[in-house]
Image (cartoon, helix red, strand yellow):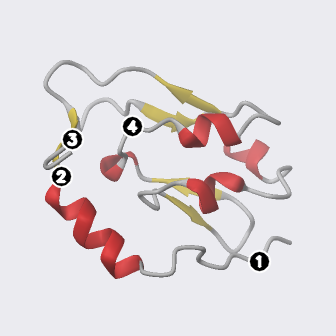
Amino acid sequence: MVVYTDPIKDRAGLERKLAIDSYHVDPNRAHIWIIDHETCLQCERQQCINCCPAACYAPQPDGRVIFSYEGCVECGTCRIVCNEFDNIAWTYPRGGFGIQYRYG
């Protein structure tokens, strides 16, 4: 059983910084998703939870991982750390959708 501890020391500060960015969410098409939620049960480390800078991955009591693409900053970190099972799929957002960075 994985015990989740929040590795981000200043979660409120992170939220303030992410709030500066603009998101145009595509309600009809997720640009990134977990391929098979059952596969996440086999993953001991569940690094996607700890490594996502936007905290889009959330652990569930049963060991599954829930992903919310609406706040994704499209950095690709989760795809890199999910190298054991390669269980995260990604495509470019459709034109006009996705994150728009403000101030760098």
Location of residue 76 with respect to 8 vertically, above or below: above
Tag 2: amino acid: Asp
Q: Which mark is residue 87?
A: none
In the rendered image, is residue 83 in sight?
yes
Q: Position of residue 103 (x, y in %)?
A: 14, 49
Neighbor class of circle 1 (other Cα within 10 Å; few <14, some 14-19, many 20+) is few
Q: CA distance from mark 2 to mark 4?
A: 12 Å
Neighbor class of circle 4 (other Cα within 10 Å; few <14, some 14-19, many 20+) is some
In the rendered image, is residue 36 in sight?
no
Whether residues under marks 4 and 1 lie with C-beta atoms below 8 angstroms apart, the answer is no
Q: Please identify the quadrant where the C terminus is shown.
A: top left
Tag 3: amino acid: Val
Location of residue 52 with respect to 86 vertically, above or below: below
Camera-side mark, 4 or 1:
4
Tag 1: amino acid: Val
Location of residue 74 with respect to 19 vertically, above or below: above
* Residue 8 shown left or right of residue 74 in the figure: right
Camera-side mark, 1 or 2:
2
Judge by depth and name the residue closer to the eye, 8 or 36. 8
Q: Earlier in the sequence, mark 3 or mark 4?
A: 3
Q: Position of residue 52 (x, y in %)?
A: 52, 54
Camera-side mark, 3 or 2:
2
Q: Position of residue 21 (x, y in %)?
A: 18, 52
Tag 4: amino acid: Glu
Q: Please identify the quadrant where the N terminus is shown.
A: bottom right
Name the residue tied to disc 2.
21
Name the residue tied to disc 1.
3
Q: CA distance from mark 4 to mark 1?
A: 26 Å
Whether residues under marks 1 and 3 lie with C-beta atoms below 8 angstroms apart, the answer is no
Q: Earlier in the sequence, mark 4 or mark 1?
A: 1
Name the residue tied to disc 4.
74
